[in-house]
Image (tube, grey):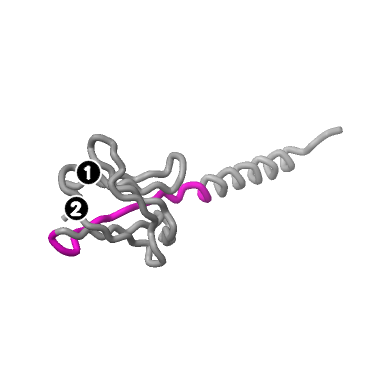
Amino acid sequence: MKISTSKYAIHALVVLGTAMLSTAVFADNPIGHCQKKAPDTVQCRGAFSDGDEAVGMTVDVISYDEKILIQGKLDKDSTITFKQPKGEFYVLFDAGPGYIVEIDHTEIK
């Protein structure tokens, strides 16, 4: 059975196109931003790099000695508001294995 070169080319393009689409599907990374809303209040917002909201994404506020100070999830507006902990901490946005964002307290203005 002889297969023409054009069939190989079409097959290669289909495989390549499928691979590129599957990469694009999984290329949406979480992003996060936190800012002070008052001297002792922080509001954080999460989203994905494609612009999608991140409703329900897990957010933890963690001390430098790895104690979880606050646990929560992003609300219907993809935000979470909390009282700023005393001492050094960071905010961890967790969208699943390999998809996390950390924001250090020094970056929150």
Task: Decide if residue 105 is on the left or right side of residue 73.
Answer: left
Task: Decide if residue 22 is on the left or right side of residue 107.
Answer: right
Q: CA separation, marks 2 and 1?
A: 11 Å
- Farthest residue to the right: give it: 1
Residue 10: quarter of image: top right
Which residues lie in the magenta part? 24-39
| Picture residue at 46% right of the left edge, 47% below the top | 27
Q: Nearer the viewer, residue 35 or 30?
A: 35
- Of label 2 and label 1, which has the lower sequence position? 1
Q: Quadrant of the C terminus?
A: bottom left
- Secondary structure, mark 1, is strand
Question: Which label belongs to residue 13?
Answer: none
Residue mark closest to the camera, 2 vs 1: 1
Q: Nearer the viewer, residue 59 or 6?
A: 59
| Picture residue at 37% right of the left edge, 66% below the top | 77
| Picture residue at 51% right of the left edge, 49% below the top | 24
Residue 42: quarter of image: bottom left
- Secondary structure, mark 2, is loop
Amino acid of disc 2: Ile
Tag 1 residue: 89
Task: Judge whether 97 appears above or below 74 on screen.
Answer: above
Amino acid of disc 1: Phe
Tag 2 residue: 108
Q: Nearer the viewer, residue 8 or 51?
A: 51
| Picture residue at 25% right of the left edge, 44% below the top | 90
Q: Position of residue 35 (x, y in %)?
A: 21, 58
Q: Position of residue 79 (x, y in %)?
A: 34, 62
Task: Decide if residue 63 is on the left or right side of residue 94.
Answer: left
Residue 11: quarter of image: top right
